Image: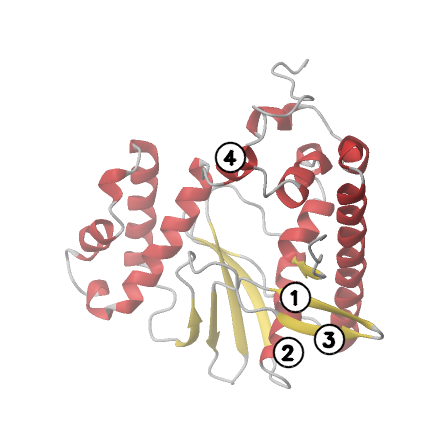
């Protein structure tokens, strides 16, 4: 019996189909195939379970912010950074990861941007998939997944959706728009804005807003992506031999940093200048 293919969309899925402007060189549909079509293969599961350094730093940085706000005294204690580092067990991480996360903790300790805020939601980052939001557009239904890091209420009542970043990660406006769409369903008729904050550089993005027509356009785009994803999975399950045609490769410099390079037949180890 063929397992049901659920219709869903998320910012992550959108980014796997279409990279941010200027990041096309890093995009590869073949990678999406491993992540979405072959995710139950043992070797793929093993590779996906291995966090990259930048993924680990991002997760631990977010967990650090979470821990600071679980015990507000940590932001007042001269040993606050050390105590959070102990909670995160940074001594078990590599020197590179531990060093960068310590700097993130110091940054946040010195500039706790959520201190005094009316926090509605603050994620630790390792809770797993968020609860899906069922969306109906015409005769089509799909689940929207939005892994929102933080929501707090501004003094004027506006909901502020905040996503944490680390490293040199660029802010992708589409992510903020998807989260605004999600909040429209989670908190109906409440005004909302979205922004990004880099925990290493202390850099805020500009505020992202959207009117009803813009959110409707985002929803329509997500429907398109959800349908395309379903169609690709059906094609693959019907004929696994067509994997390379359904999910074409884009070999290049991106191969050097791909988590699936050990099992990808299109991997190239050297890139000409």
Callout 1 crowding tier (Cα within 10 Å): few <14, some 14–19, many ≥20: many
Q: Which residue matches tag 1?
A: 144
Q: Is residue 177 above or below residue 30?
A: below
Residue 135 x, y percent position in the rendering = 71, 73
* Residue at the image point whose x is 29% and y is 39% from the top: 98
Disc 4: CA contacts within 10 A as few (<14), some (14-19) or many (>=20): some
Q: Residue at x 33, y 70 (%)?
A: 115
* Marks 4/1: CA–CA distance: 26 Å
Q: Is residue 18 visible?
A: no
Marks 2 and 1 sit apart, C-alpha to C-alpha, by: 10 Å
Between disc 4 and disc 1, whose residue precedes? 4
**From mark 1 to mark 3, how far is it between C-alphas?**
19 Å
- Check disc 4 and report the residue beneath it: 47
Counting residues from the start of the chain, the first of labels 3 and 4 encountered is 4
- Tell me the residue that label 3 is attached to: 211
Question: Where's residue 203, x and y in %?
Answer: 47, 53
- Cα separation between marks 3 and 2: 14 Å
The answer to whether the residue labelled 4 contacts the one labelled 2, judged by CB atoms less than 8 Å apart, is no
């Amino acid at each position: 019996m063929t397992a049901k293919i659920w219709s869903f969309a998320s910012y992550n899925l959108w980014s796997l189909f279409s990279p941010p402007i200027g990041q096309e060189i890093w995009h590869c549909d073949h990678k999406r195939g491993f992540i979405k079509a072959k995710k139950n293969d043992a070797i793929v599961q093993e590779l996906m379970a291995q966090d990259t350094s930048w993924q680990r730093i991002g997760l631990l940085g977010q967990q650090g912010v979470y821990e600071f706000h679980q015990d507000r005294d940590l932001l007042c204690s001269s040993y606050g950074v050390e105590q959070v580092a102990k909670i995160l067990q940074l001594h078990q991480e590599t020197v590179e990861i531990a060093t960068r996360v310590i700097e993130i903790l110091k940054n946040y300790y010195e500039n706790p941007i959520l201190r005094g805020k009316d926090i509605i939601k603050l994620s630790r980052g390792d809770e797993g998939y968020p609860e899906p939001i069922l969306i109906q557009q015409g005769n089509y239904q799909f689940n929207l997944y939005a892994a929102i890091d933080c929501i707090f209420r501004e003094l004027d009542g506006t909901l502020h959706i905040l996503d944490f970043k680390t490293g040199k990660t660029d802010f992708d406006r589409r992510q903020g728009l998807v989260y605004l769409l999600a909040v429209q369903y989670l908190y109906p008729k409440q005004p909302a804005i979205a922004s990004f904050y880099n925990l290493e550089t202390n850099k805020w993005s500009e505020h992202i807003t959207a009117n009803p027509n813009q959110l409707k356009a985002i929803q329509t785009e997500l429907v398109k992506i959800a349908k395309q994803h379903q169609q690709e999975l059906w094609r693959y399950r019907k004929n696994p031999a067509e994997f390379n045609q359904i999910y074409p490769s884009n070999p290049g410099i991106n191969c050097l940093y791909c988590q699936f390079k050990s099992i990808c037949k299109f991997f190239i180890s050297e890139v000409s200048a």
